[in-house]
Amino acid sequence: MSLTTESFQLIIKERLEASLVQVEDMSGGCGQAFAVIIVSPLFQGKNKLMRHRLVNNALKEEIAGIHAFTQKGFTPEEWTAQGGSL
Amino acid sequence: MFRLLTSRIATPPRAYGFVNTRFMSNEIKDAIQKAIDSSKVVLFMKGTPEFPQCGFSRATIQILGQQGVDPNKFAAYNVLEDSELRDGIKEFSSWPTIPQLYVDKEFIGGCDIIMSMAQSGELAELLEKTDCLVPEEDDGELDIKPAERG
């Protein structure tokens, strides 16, 4: 089953206990390239590499099935500190 | 666009999953370790530094150039030339995407991480600390000129 922005967003939200997930489809609709922003308390105390690994592991099958994946992860505190709303 | 499409049909996502779950041979493991040991800054990328074949690899190469990485301390490996390397490096680093950057034999991350490290100044700090940058030109000139006159 190919991913849509909506289905991917739900998967990420659930698996990473995210308070906010933004998914942008950069493929032009074929469902093969996504850019995501994830705000989750699970990132607390983790550096960038650890955050990416956490996301990569949680989304292993999804990432393997798509062509391009780019991610940014923030804790809720970091997100609101830079002016984002939850 | 067309080439992307045909290659996707030839190797559907399921096949990737299968390849990823296979164990990597020791031979490939050794070859990858050797590649990582071959230079201070090692990039596994799609295409070559001159002709990157993926936007993420291109962006990464550009950043490393802007940071002033010493070409003598840099090696790039094109995963598109070798399917064993392409799958092997993903398992080796436990990282699902290309490009992948190693500095001083240590895995640093992919394009997203490198970009954000470049913005925050962490990358410059790391490259400086591990002595991976081109030596300052001014210092070199100062050293040479008095010697030539003498």
Image (cartoon, coloured by chain):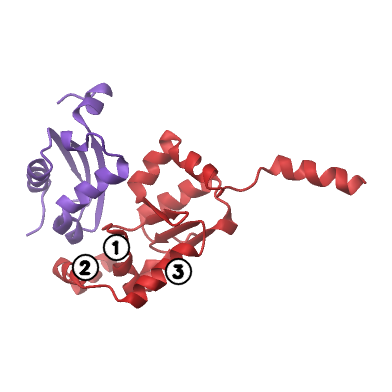
Chain colours: A purple, B red
Q: Residue A47 vs residue B141: left or right? A: left
Determine the secondary structure under disc 1.
Answer: helix
Which mark, residue B6?
Answer: none
Q: Sequence order check: which comes first, mark 2 or mark 1?
A: 2
- Residue type (three-letter) at the residue carrying disc 2: Asn
Q: Residue B105 vs residue A42: left or right? A: right
Residue at the image point whose x is 15% and y is 37% from the top: A21
On the same chain, marks 1 and 3? The answer is yes
- Few, some or many residues within 10 Å of mark 3 (<14, 14–19, 20+): few
Chain under callout 2: B
Chain under callout 3: B
- Residue type (three-letter) at the residue carrying disc 1: Lys
Which residue is denoted by mark 3 in the rendering? B34
Q: Sequence order check: which comes first, mark 2 or mark 3?
A: 2
> At which x and y percent is residue B48?
46, 63
**Can you say which quadrant of the picture contains the N terminus of chain B?**
bottom left
Tell whether label 1 touches label 2 (CB within 8 Å). yes
Determine the secondary structure under disc 2.
Answer: helix
Tell whether label 3 touches label 2 (CB within 8 Å). no
On the same chain, marks 2 and 3? The answer is yes
Q: Sequence order check: which comes first, mark 1 or mark 3?
A: 3
Which mark, residue B90?
Answer: 1
Which mark, residue B20?
Answer: 2
Q: Is residue A40 visible?
A: no
CA gap, disc 2 and disc 1: 8 Å
> At which x and y percent is residue B145?
84, 44
- Residue type (three-letter) at the residue carrying disc 3: Lys
Q: Is residue B79 visible?
A: yes
Residue at the image point whose x is 19% and y is 28% from the top: A76
